[in-house]
Amino acid sequence: MTTNAIDRVKLQVTSDSRWSIPLPNANNPTHVAFIDDTGFEKISVSRYGAIVFAGDGLLISLWKTWFKQPLPMVTPPPPTEREVAPGVWTDVNICLITTAGRVLYDWGHCVTHGDSARFSGSGKFFARDCFAKNGCSMRAIDTAGVSDPFTGGTTRYVELHSGISNLTKDEATLQDAERMLNEGGSLMELATGIVTPLKDARDSMADALHALQNGPTLSAPTGHPSRKWSDDEKMALQAALQEMFAAPPAEQK
């Protein structure tokens, strides 16, 4: 799962770097396979601002590729959900922020600290409570990782006003991240918190790992059931994207 934070005062966006696969499935997980620090980031940045993602890894990958085009609106944006089995959907959560820290669109479950900060993902309450005491979004993500087993790895950040960040310069792909999971991932038993290297667990935890044989996609689950976006939600996102790309970055106040 994941934890994301947006500090609108310091104009800083932060996220953890853990990608995971709930096993045997997202509705009834007993274990979670995960990998940290893959270089496949949950924050995508352009000269117009940033998008912070959670949800399905494949959809996130499509959105990141689209967002980084020189002229994204020349082509239609990617889908916001996909059907992974008959009647079963997975989705993407999106928060669209300008370089001035203005949130143009926010779809997903989040909590706030007044008007100054926004938090989403499975560790959002831990992050918000930490931020309320310390006013630091980096520390908030780190703290969420201590209490929330689905948040972890290096905390990534970008300063919207300066472009300074610790995001991976040569970003990995979703396929790279999935290969890293197979080669060096871990398996956590949720009831106990015990973590085992994935390669060591393949025999002893064969039942838990059986679902991996079907090739599920890495994700940054939010802790909430996936659903299809409504037509109104899609239209509102489209309008927000048009607003972001129509205005020069300096005018996005």
Image (cartoon, rainbow, N blue to C red):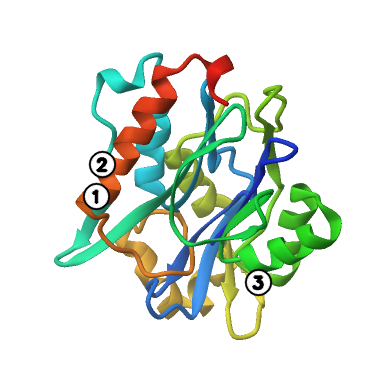
In the picture, measured across the screen, residue 174 lies left or right of residue 194, that is: left
Q: Nearer the viewer, residue 197 or 150?
A: 150
Residue 153 appears anywhere in the view: yes
Instruction: State yes or no: discs 2 and 3 in contact (Cβ < 8 Å).
Output: no
Instruction: State yes or no: discs 2 and 1 in contact (Cβ < 8 Å).
Output: yes
Residue 152 placement (x, y as % from top left): 67, 58
Report helix, strand or loop for mark 3.
strand
Residue 105 against residue 19 in the figure, above or below: above
The residue carrying mark 1 is 232
Mark 2 or 3, closer to the camera: 2
Q: CA distance from mark 2 to mark 3?
A: 43 Å
Numbered mark located on residue 172 in the image: none
The residue carrying mark 2 is 235
Q: Nearer the viewer, residue 67 or 17?
A: 67
Q: CA distance from mark 2 to mark 1?
A: 5 Å
Report helix, strand or loop for mark 1.
helix
Q: Nearer the viewer, residue 5 or 10?
A: 10
Q: How many marks?
A: 3
Q: Earlier in the sequence, mark 3 or mark 1?
A: 3
Pointer 3 local density, CA inside 10 Å: few below 14, some 14–19, many at least 20: some
- Please tell me which residue is depicted at 29% across the width and 49% down the height of the picture: 233
Question: Which of the image's four quarters has the C terminus?
Answer: top right
The residue carrying mark 3 is 195
Hey, what amino acid is under mark 1? Asp
